[in-house]
Amino acid sequence: MDNQTPPASAPLGATIFADGLLDASVQHGVVRLTLGRLGADNKPVPAGLLVIPLVQLAGLTQGLGRLMQQIEAKIKEAAPAAPETPPDSFTFGGR
């Protein structure tokens, strides 16, 4: 039983709220991303450290890119239809 995978209901760990990225480094095949958030004085402060094996970075960023595309598609669906672009030139009175 020592080598069992934890059940899906197992706790995930810490939840980190981040507004952005403060720092990034790669050392010994590991990417370290220092996540940041705005502090009380509206200055960025560290919120946590995300550590990713370098070989997994491309897959993670591709997944985030796909998520962004899905979000943009949902926003476009929810937005009202834009009016047609007006013509470059026109006349009054049918001339």
Image (cartoon, grey):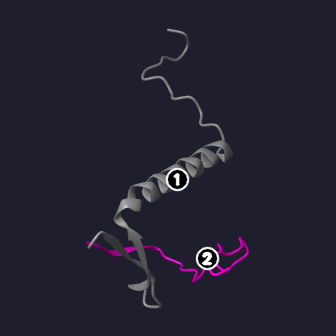
Query: Which residue position is annotated with label 1?
Result: 68
- First reached walking from the N terminus: tag 2 or tag 1: 2
Q: Does the magenta stretch include residue 36?
A: no
Q: Which residue lies furthest to the bottom in this view?
A: 40
Q: Identify the image quadrant of residue 56.
A: bottom left
Dot 2, how many residues are within 10 Å of its Cα: few (below 14), some (14-19), or many (20+)?
few
Q: What stretch is highlighted in magenta?
A: 1-27
What residue is rendered at 26% in x and 73% in y?
Answer: 28
Name the element at disc 2.
Answer: loop
Any magenta on residue 9? yes
Residue at the top extreme of this rendering: 95
Does 80 appear above or below 4? Answer: above
Quadrant hosting residue 22: bottom left
Q: What element carries label 1?
A: helix
Residue 48 occupies quadrant = bottom left
Left or right of 11, for residue 88: left
The one nearer the camera, 49 or 42, is 49
Taken as a whole, is the magenta stretch helix, strand or loop? Answer: loop
Q: Which amino acid does label 2 sit on?
A: Asn
Q: Which amino acid does label 1 sit on?
A: Met
The answer to whether mark 2 and mark 1 are in CB contact below 8 A is no
The percent position of residue 67, horizontal first and vertical second, equals: 55, 53
Give the crowd class for mark 1: few <14, some 14-19, many >=20 residues within 10 Å.
few
Q: Which residue is located at x 61 percent, y 44 percent? A: 76
**Where 24 falls versus 92 (above or below)?**
below
Give the position of the N terminus as an image quadrant: bottom right
Q: What distance separates the C-alpha of mark 2 from that of mark 1?
A: 36 Å
Residue identifier under label 2 = 3
Q: Where is residue 45 in the image (x, y as percent from the top left)?
A: 40, 86
Q: Where is residue 65 in the image (x, y as percent from the top left)?
A: 47, 52
Residue 67 in the figure: left or right of residue 29: right
The residue at 65%/74% (across/down) is: 4
